[in-house]
Image (tube, coloured by chain):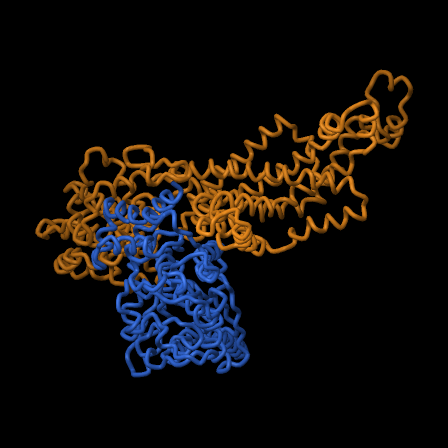
Chain colours: A blue, B orange
Amino acid sequence: MKTKTILMTATAVVLAGAASAEEMADSMTLVSWGGAYQASQVNAYSEPYKALNPGLEVIWDESSNEAVAKLRAMNEAGNVTWDLVDVVASDAIRLCDEGLAMEFDPDELLAEGDDGTPASEDFGDLIVSDCFIPQIVYSTTFGYRTDMVGDTPPTDVCAVFDTETYPGKRSLEKRPINNMEWALICDGVSDEEVYDVLETEEGQARAFAKLDTIKDDVIWWSAGADTPQLLADGEVVMGSTYNGRLFSVIEEQKQPVAMLWDAQVFDLDGWIIPAGLPADRLARVKDFVKFATDTQRLADQAKYISYGPARQSSAPLVGKHAELGIEMAPHMPTDPNNAKHTFLYNYEWWADYRDDLDAKFQAWLAQ
Amino acid sequence: MAEATADTATPTPGSVATGPMLAADGVPLKRSLARALRREKLRALALIAPLLIFILVSFIAPIVDMLFRSVENEIVSETLPRTVVALKDWDYESGEGPGEDVYAALYVDLVEAEEMKTHTRLGSRLNYEMTGISSLFRKTGRGIGRMDTDAYTKAITTLDAAWNEPATWIAVMDDDSARALLPETASAWSSWTRIVAANNDDIAKEEPGDFLFTTLYRDLSAATPDALAGYEGPEAARVREAAARIGSIEPVSLREQFLDIDKDWSDVQVWGTIQAFSPKYTPGYFLSAVDLQETPSGIEQQPDDQKIYRLLFKRTMFMSLAIMFSCILLGYPVAFLLSSLPLRTSNVLLILVLLPFWTSLLVRTSAWKVLLQQQGVINDVLVWMGVVADNDRLVMINNQFGTIVAMTHILLPFMILPLYSVMKTIPPTYLRAAKSLGATNWTAFWRVYFPQSVPGIGAGCILVFILSIGYYITPELVGGTTGTFISNRIAYHISSSLNWGLAAALGTILLVLVLALYWVYDRIVGIDNVNLG
């Protein structure tokens, strides 16, 4: 009789233990890019979430730049300390391929839109990988010095290759992605055919030949802050960077810089959940993701930074900048006025050709 | 016994002359001394053991492990074990794709790899060698579950519904003679047990997968009548019955199935790449690191438009030497001045040397940008003085010049400090003595002072050269296209392309180069002559 009681108590304890494993961890580590972008996430996502969950500890790690390598190292060491990682879509694909990110069913993990649209439709094509939770749409585009272009401000991306009308240096990112596409577009290739052309040796040679025409006039950047600084110093007449950086140069720092939205390349940034999290941490992060990617939260982020929310249902809710008080909608890359001519980055294609073209690009640079 | 001890303990004068000298306990003194010394050594070793073990575990082992990645290539044979074996006999030079057996092996391998989510990882690995394999594996992984091989499942279970029961399979696959009769099925069954275990399912309840029926079909078609007749294991009647009617099943070409998913599976280049990289260890990464490549038809030069690493190695060497020499040129006079001034003044000046040393690296690099850029301070001053035209400003940053300037500034303290500490120890009386003996200022310096300061130069050179050869932040920020180092590519492969094998190979070569230069230096200058202060 007594033995039975003990056994039953033991079972009850074990069951209680199993049940508590389903509970949510009381701290989580989020990884992001630091700076204004991370601040917008803190304001729009984690602070409201903490208000709903008192006692929760949120730790931010500014490691998104090296997230892929660090996550792989953590995974090999068998100790993943991150719960949610902010990465660009191409990195998410890489992490998914490597088995380092968790695959999920969007309709199960993510909240419905406020109009009841299932998440998979609300995000639509932006879910470019089985592991990727889209957050924002940003674009890589050009800004130019309004005082250095004379009376004819550029309206066409090919102004970058026109050193006669627009003399001076340009800044471009030190990698083949985007530059090869722009070179081909300005060499007369139609948008739809860019990747077909770029797949061939001749097409690649053609893109390099086009880039050759401005090679001596280019300053190559590797950090997102370079172009804004070069523009502010008047070191370059135009340069490519992320549209949010240009917004801050133009609206916050009031520099004589303007946007050239033509042929802006859309890219995505979002979350991935590392594979193999313990149950309690996974439960916590799932709960957070559901909250932080709902319609209102994504729209809220646009109050702090000029990146477009990834949900279609969020677009109508985008309001004014939290500090400057200006309407944010006209500054979004997705605004109809800005998105007259856009170019969509082909993730699958670059996943294949990145290694090859990067080697060629670096060799071309070094020549 | 006490007597004997006493005997040996007090040796007579005679025994000293004939035998070895003995210690107080009768053991020969030599051995006793050696033992005491050994004990001392062990004690010393035990004292430093925690540190030694710590360094071995936390420093040496990870480095060795990382460098080992430069040759390690187990991923191919681990992910595609059967394909690698089946491909052994295939000849790339024949120009024809492999036979059905290879496709069958690939099918089973990829079903397991897809379940375990390892196929895309292999795809990224092989994509370093051949562009396009990454998406080929991703696409094939998506299509592998939708192949027409379910025709076999339908046909065999229609013949005998018992084959749909996990119990039948478990019974047959548990028997050695059955496994010998059905080798491919047995191998596929082991994959199946791993897949079921990975999904935390119960093998007795899971409906057997399509690929098991495919291998069963292949095994039964290939089995000789004798082997079948001699089979006495479990379900013998059922197996014989299935074998007897196997000819009535319409075969499905696995080759065609793979080509339906992606026509690249008929490309001999793809198969050649898999074959060339199937060994567990590969020289491939090292070849890539010196602009060669391993192709199915042997080692070849990398195409000209992809050659970069040899150039970068040469440039890294050249620029590190340039930085080292400019550090000597600038650092030597400063150190000389510091050591000859009175202590009070030299201490103030030393703080000026150290102040930038304590400032953030990024701040110093950015400061050089502000100074050197075309709209920067130096150019502005030159334009104002009329030395250069406004529309023809000097390009001093984002090239080799900018990198050498910024890095010389950053590494200068590493040259000045060892020089200073050596010069401090050279007595000023020597110089005065030389002069009193009639030497000119130059002779006194060159013949008396300089030779004594060489150990400081040696130490400074080693520090500056080794630090600069591995630098990458400053070259990345101010190097432009002509001022980047090999370390920038290593960083790219570690953090961005995830090609850790190539990064490890580049790192190993860099390490070997540094060690070789160190050896040369030891031969020429002598490492004993180095004084690190």
Name the residue nearer the viewer: B134 or B94: B134
Tell me where residue A54 appears, x and y as whole percent.
53, 81
Number of numbered discs: 0
Name the residue nearer the viewer: A55 or A122: A122
A143 vs A59, left or right, is left
A6 vs A201, left or right, is right
> Within the image, what quadrant is residue B456 found in?
top right
Name the residue nearer the viewer: B28 or B267: B267
A338 vs B311, left or right, is left
Depicted B274 relative to depicted B10: above or below: below
Answer whether residue B120 is visible to the viewer in this image.
no
Tell me where residue B98 appears, x and y as whole percent.
20, 40
Point 26% across, 53% down: residue = A184
Tell me where residue B168 appears, x and y as whole percent.
24, 58
Q: Check the image and name the residue furthest to the left.
A: B248
Q: Check the image and name the residue furthest to the front.
A: B386
Quadrant where the C terminus of chain B sits is top right
Name the residue nearer the viewer: A294 or A105: A294
Quadrant where the N terminus of chain B sits is top right
Answer whether residue B16 is visible to the viewer in this image.
yes
Point 80% across, 26% down: residue = B434
A171 vs B9, left or right, is left
Tell me where residue A250 appears, x and y as whole percent.
43, 69
